[in-house]
Amino acid sequence: MQVAPSLLSCDFADIKNEIKTVNSADMLHLDVMDGHFVPNISIGIPVVQSIRKATDMVLDCHLMISDPEKYVPQFAKAGADIITFHVEATENCGKLIDTITELGVKPSLSIKPNTPAEAVFPYLDKLYMVLVMTVEPGFGGQKMITDCLEKVKVIKAEIARRGLDTIVQADGGINDETLAMTVESGVDVAVLGSAVFAQSDRNSYIEKIQRM
């Protein structure tokens, strides 16, 4: 299983060195919140630009924002390798996926806990990744809503049925208590925040999960 540490849980005062402590990961997960689509505010475009200068790791930008169409080109220019937006945030999913692809970035679509798995089905053939939120987006450190892992299974089954290469990511409450069920659901990429950054040897912890 691939691992994507969420930098929301790192020490932003020492972010360059914090990234080095998780550089065995497959990608870095950057949570972008606008205080409108979700009830919190986090990093924006300048921080993504700075992170891009600090590492050549894959930057997985999760846009928890309203009107993602307005900002996708700026995040692509800032250095995002993957851009995830929410199906609930726009009525133009197909067009926005095409825009992300045209910008040379891998497109990804996310669903909140109350959104059915089938919401992503019309777009699977255009997507690099689907992100299944296993908590309500907006805050780190929440307890996993384990029923959401059933949506991972449904989406993975549809991907397999169509013979696609789309991968599935899960984000929210993934830790030592929920890792086994996360793996069992078929998740390809696990986003971990506090579970990783609480470790004394973060890279060893990441490598252990990658072997699961």
Image (tube, rainbow, N blue to C red):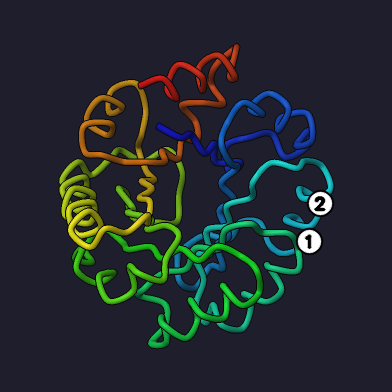
Q: Is residue 125 above or below residue 140?
A: below
Q: Which quadrant of the figure contains the C terminus?
A: top left
Q: Amino acid at mark 1?
A: Pro
Crowding around mark 2 (Cα neighbors within 10 Å: few <14, some 14 to 19, many 20+) is some
Looking at the picture, tell me which residue is in the foreground, 168 or 144.
168
In the drawing, what numbered circle is on residue 122?
none
Rendered location of residue 128, percent (x, y) = 45, 60
Rendered location of residue 168, percent (x, y) = 35, 50
Give the residue at mark 2. Answer: 50
Q: Which residue extends farthest front?
A: 163
Q: Secondary structure under badge 2?
A: helix
Rendered location of residue 29, percent (x, y) = 56, 46
Asked if residue 77 lies left or right of residue 61, the reply is right
Q: Which residue is pictured at 23% across the width and 63% down the height?
A: 162
Q: Are marks 2 and 1 in contact (CB under 8 Å)?
A: yes
Question: Quadrant of the rendered structure where residue 154 is?
Answer: bottom left
Rendered location of residue 152, percent (x, y) = 23, 49
Asked if residue 86 lies left or right of residue 196, the reply is left
Q: Which residue is pictured at 37% across the width and 43% down the height?
A: 172
Q: Which residue is pictured at 34% across the width and 74% down the height?
A: 123
Q: Cα distance, mark 2 to mark 1?
A: 6 Å
Q: Is residue 116 above or below residue 149?
A: below
Q: Which quadrant of the figure contains the N terminus?
A: top left
Give the residue at mark 1. Answer: 46
Q: Secondary structure under badge 1?
A: helix
Q: Amino acid at mark 2?
A: Ser
Question: Quadrant of the rendered structure where residue 32 is?
Answer: bottom right
Asked if residue 50 lies left or right of residue 90, the reply is right
